[in-house]
Amino acid sequence: MPFKLINTEMFLMAVLRMLDAFSGLVIFRFLATFCVHTDSLLQVEETATIVCVCIFIFFHFNNVYRSFRFSSFRYEIHMICLACFSLFIVLIIIGYITRLFFFLPRACVIYWMVLWPIFIFMVRIAMRGLLRSIRRKGYNLKKAVIAGKSKAGITLAKHIYGNSWTGTDVVGFFNDDATSDDSDINDHFSHIPCLGNLGALIQYIETHDVDILYIALNGNDEDTIRKLVQAVDRFAISVHYIPNVFFLDLVMGSEIIFFDQRPVIVLKDTPIYGLSGLIKRLTDIVVSALVLMLTAPILLLIALCIKIDSRGSVFFVQARYGINGEKINIYKFRTMFESTQDPPGVYHQATKNDDRITPVGRFLRKSSLDELPQFINVFQGRMSLVGPRPHPVAMNEQYRKIISGYMVRHKVKPGITGLAQVKGFRGETDTLEKMEKRVECDLRYIREWSVLFDMEIMVRTLIVFLFQKNAY
């Protein structure tokens, strides 16, 4: 008989705690031993012990040791990076005050701060792969029941069965007629039985081994939900609430603040502030400055080719919306014959065989080199390296009226690249569906934004830059 799941997870968390701290100690001692004289080895042992204790403390209080069964790997790495960052800051402060690390070369400490997190990431990757493989084979499973065969409950069941790596087995629904949504019941899920009404749920939990209760009622009967939660309080099971689709879309990525002592959900606001926002801005400044300096000869060559190819200015300057809907001027290399460019307030999107595009312009668009001057916008602070792509004013005015949530894109700075671009929604948007997909990606970026997410998008942009096919 397999171990109880809760014991297995507790055991894995204990192993990870020991492995993280022990690996930090071993890597630190290994590097320090090669960097100091023999008479400093006692200091190495003392310092390594302090480092080990700090790892235990900071990783515990940064919520690293919890189940990431249903979370993305990016989220888990994000939590580990936050824990490492706070740990390193405190160690540096302690080292400066107590002269703890003064016997070590700086390079030794820097190597440790790089190599140890890389080792942790590799361990997490290996563990995720192993656990997901085990769960796909039917082991290490959590048994779940869903209260409410509503649209939210059926969508959840579909998602669970489409992602077997979560290791979740939905044994059945419990449903009252008031919570049913027959129009959305799919025959593919006829093998998931309805085990009774909500009144039978408590008796089932008493007599069966259930790990998770998902409450997926329609959301309007607050009294039923409250009574259900209170009724299962005496059982050692996890209770997850699944809001209806409208509410989920409304609050996804929102923040809870307190007005006096009353909680308030902030539905729409910029997620980029504080230290993370400062890091994003510093990254924008450093990278844009480096790109402009390194590509200066290429910029001059492109400008010369544009002047030779056709009459008109080198740059194309267009008004677009920036953060909070403020108008900004963005810079691009001119890729069309100047006489065929749209007048102010009018916009006709470029198509595959658009005869307005110059020969040099066609190459610039295909290679995305026409976007290089936008690094000037980034350096000025009008744009960011990563964010929703800014659309022409005329396009904004058109789509803001027909796509829900469109203007939420402007709660962050527009970017040279974004999630929509690396997901393939770049170039011509000749149908409403394509624009809706682009906006959907932009809103997901805003909900899930982090410095790590920005780095991921920048790396994926380099790949797209090499293999893109849909830029005209």
Image: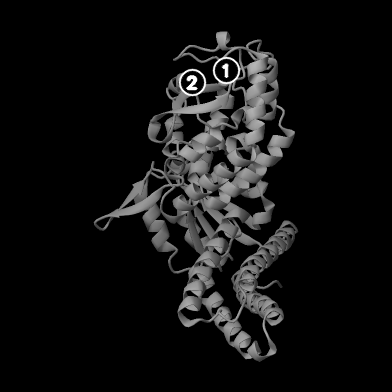
Q: Position of residue 288 (x, y in %)?
A: 56, 42
The residue lying toward the viewer, choosing from 428 and 296, is 296
Residue 190 visible within the image: no
Residue reaching furthest top?
339
Q: Which residue is drawn at 41% across and 45% down?
A: 219
Mark 1: few/some/many CA within 10 Å (<14, 14-19, 20+): few
Q: Which residue is drawn at 48% across and 21% down?
A: 395
* 18 to 283, vertically: above or below: below
Where does label 2 land, which residue? 395
Residue closer to the observer: 47 or 238: 47
The answer to whether residue 427 is visible is yes
Q: Quadrant of residue 329?
A: top left
Report the amino acid beneath label 2: Met
Query: What element does badge 1 sit on?
Result: loop
Q: How crowded is mark 2: few (under 14 residues within 10 Å), some or many (20 or more)?
A: some
Q: Which mark is residue 349?
A: 1
* x and y, in percent, of residue 300 in the image: 63, 29
State the residue lying farthest toward the left. Answer: 260
Mark 2: which secondary structure? helix
Q: Which residue is drawn at 54% across and 28% down?
A: 436
Figure colour scheme: one colour
> Vertically, is 202 above or below 154?
below
Q: Is residue 177 above or below residue 391?
A: below
- Say above or below: 419 vs 108: above
Mark 1 and mark 2: Cα distance apart in space? 9 Å
Q: Residue 180 carries which label?
A: none
User: In which quarter of the view is residue 101 placed?
Assistant: bottom right
Query: Relative to residue 216, is residue 304 drawn left or right?
Result: right
Judge by depth and name the residue closer to the eye, 414 or 12: 414
Mark 1 belongs to which amino acid? Gln
Q: Do the residues labelled 1 and 2 touch (CB within 8 Å)?
A: yes
